[in-house]
Image: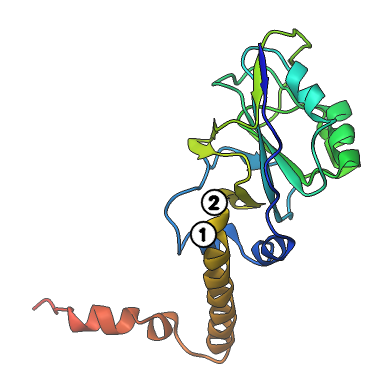
Amino acid sequence: MFTVNDMPPQIDASLVDLLEQAETATIGHVLYEGFVDRRIAPLLPGRRIAGTAVTLRLPHADSTLLHYATKLVRPGDIVLIDRCGDDKYACWGGGLTLAMKLAGVKAGIIDGPATDLSEIKEFDLPMWSRGLSSITTRLLGIEGAMNTPISVGGQVVRPGDAILADEQGVLVMSPKIAREAAERAIAMQKNEALMHKRLRAGEKLPDISGATAIVEAKMTKSA
């Protein structure tokens, strides 16, 4: 049986633009939750992508619903796939990459392997996955679910969540907290640029960060 729920509202374009100015690693100084397993890694380096979560749960070796989803996805969506623990079958390959790219999908994120890396590179669709596999799924027509809560890399992902993905990893946030998190991260990034300037001018890192004051206040000397 297949469950296909309505497409979620897309997050505001201004929030997407804001998120794409923030690094996941900087938001890691702000938030403790929402980060997926670091073993779900980018196949195309140097990308930072934000967008609206569209979710799929694909059990077994059945990718029927993923093929069907290519007629429903919209420009600005990011497709996240729960493979229900399977790490053997690649559900996403070259043909699917092109179909998603033509539909305007910004990225795919799979809790499992992908395949056809050369075509993923050719069609230039950013992908995050648990590596690659030569063994692929089939159109078995068994079951699947679309736009329901799923689990990806240990994180619950709900349709319509805000997704930010870059070289450091993937972050899942409610749109309600995403704007504040991005704004705080961008401010921290600006401060970091100023710190780099001070380091180049000769100042020492612990003097800038405050580590010198902390250590010396509690430092004892051996006899």
Q: What amino acid type should be assigned to the residue bearing mark 1?
A: Ile
Whether residue 178 appears in this view of the structure is: yes
Q: Which x, y percent locates residue 121? A: 85, 41
Residue at mark 2 to residue at mark 1: CA–CA distance: 7 Å
Residue at image point 81% right, 33% down: 72
Residue 215 appears at what percent x and percent y?
25, 78
Q: Work out whether residue 202 or residue 9 is closer to the camera in this orientation and state it.
A: 9
Tell me: residue 90, above or below residue 111: above
**209 relative to 98, above or below:** below
Work out which residue is located at the far left of the displayed protein and give it.
Answer: 223
- Element type where label 2 sits in the image: strand
Q: Could you tell me the amino acid type at mark 2?
A: Met
Question: Percent position (x, y) of residue 33?
Answer: 44, 50
Mark 2 and mark 1 residues within 8 Å of each other at the beta carbon: yes
Whole-percent x, y for residue 197 in the image? 59, 87
**Residue 107 vertical placement versus 185 (above, below):** above
Along the viewing direction, whichever of 158 and 100 lies nearer the viewer: 158
Left or right position of 69 against 21 = right
Residue lying at 73% horizontally and 28% vertically, measured from the top left: 114
Question: Is residue 51 depicted above or below 117 in this figure?
Answer: below
Q: Quadrant of the C terminus?
A: bottom left
Q: Nearer the viewer, residue 103 or 32?
A: 103
Q: Judging from the image, what secondary structure is the residue with disc 1 in? A: helix
Quadrant for residue 221, please give it.
bottom left
The residue under the point 74% across, 9% down is 141
Q: Residue at x 59, y 72 (%)?
A: 186
**Residue holding disc 1:** 177
Q: Which residue is mark 2?
A: 173
**Looking at the rendering, in which quadrant would you find the N terminus?**
top right
